[in-house]
Amino acid sequence: MLASRSRGLDGRGRAVAEGAGLALVAALAFGLLLVALGEASEGDALWATLGMRAASFSLVVVTAFVLRPSFALAERDLSVLVLIGILDTAGNALFALATTESLLSLVAVLGQLYPVVTVLLARILLGERLSPVQGTGVVGAFAGVTLITAG
């Protein structure tokens, strides 16, 4: 929660970012997804990944038909989205394969180190800076993952 703090209207940084609640729900759902993917991978990791992708794609298509959002994308944007989808699927497949070779608890914790790349890319590409409180939250989260991984 420290990493999600943003400056309030008074400039004192006391407000929690608007999406913090949704981020917590997403984290819970993502954790459940990883456990389910690990369990399904015991049979066959690649079929488990395909099943997960088919289910998520179906959900997106149904949601798009119900909500009817505007899909005005440039050709460049579409190619970037395809690349993101391919890399995401590859990451999920590798995670599924890793769960068949090691303890799910260890693989799941190590898999959660992916935000390091996001933070580094935001810093390098976008020049984003974290406030001291946000930095403390990020360091605490990574320290926790490290301690859990170390056993």
Image: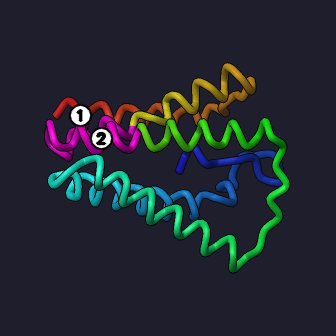
User: Quick check: 118 above or below 1?
Assistant: above
Q: Is residue 102 within the magenta segment?
A: yes
Give, as a three-letter code, the residue at label 2: Val
Left or right of 49 on screen, residue 59: right
Asked whether the residues under the numbered discs 2 and 1 touch, taking CB atoms below 8 Å apart as contact, a structural biologist would say: yes
Tally the marks: 2
* First-in-chain label (2 vs 1): 2
User: Quick check: 117 above or below 60?
Assistant: above
Pick the front one: 124 or 34: 34
- The residue at 82%/49% (across/down) is 73
Secondary structure under tag 1 reads helix
The quadrant of the picture occupied by the C terminus is top left
Give, as a three-letter code, the residue at label 1: Thr
Q: Give the range drawn in magenta.
A: 91-112
Which of the colour schemes (rainbow, by chain, secondary structure, one colour) is used? rainbow
Magenta-drawn stretch, dominant element (helix, strand or loop): helix
Alpha carbon of mark 2 to alpha carbon of mark 1: how far?
6 Å
Residue, disc 1: 149
The picture places residue 74, in percent across and down from the top left corner, at 84, 43
The picture places residue 84, in percent across and down from the top left corner, at 59, 39
Q: Splitting the image into 4 quarters, where does residue 103 fall?
A: top left
User: Quick check: 85 above or below 120?
Assistant: below
The label on residue 2 is none
User: Quick check: 117 above or below 21?
Assistant: above
Q: Splitting the image into 4 quarters, where does residue 19 fall?
A: bottom right
Callout 1 crowding tier (Cα within 10 Å): few <14, some 14–19, many ≥20: some
- The residue at 49%/42% (across/down) is 88
Residue, disc 2: 109
Callout 2 crowding tier (Cα within 10 Å): few <14, some 14–19, many ≥20: some
Left or right of 59 on screen, residue 148: left
- The residue at 57%/33% (across/down) is 118
- The residue at 20%/51% (across/down) is 44
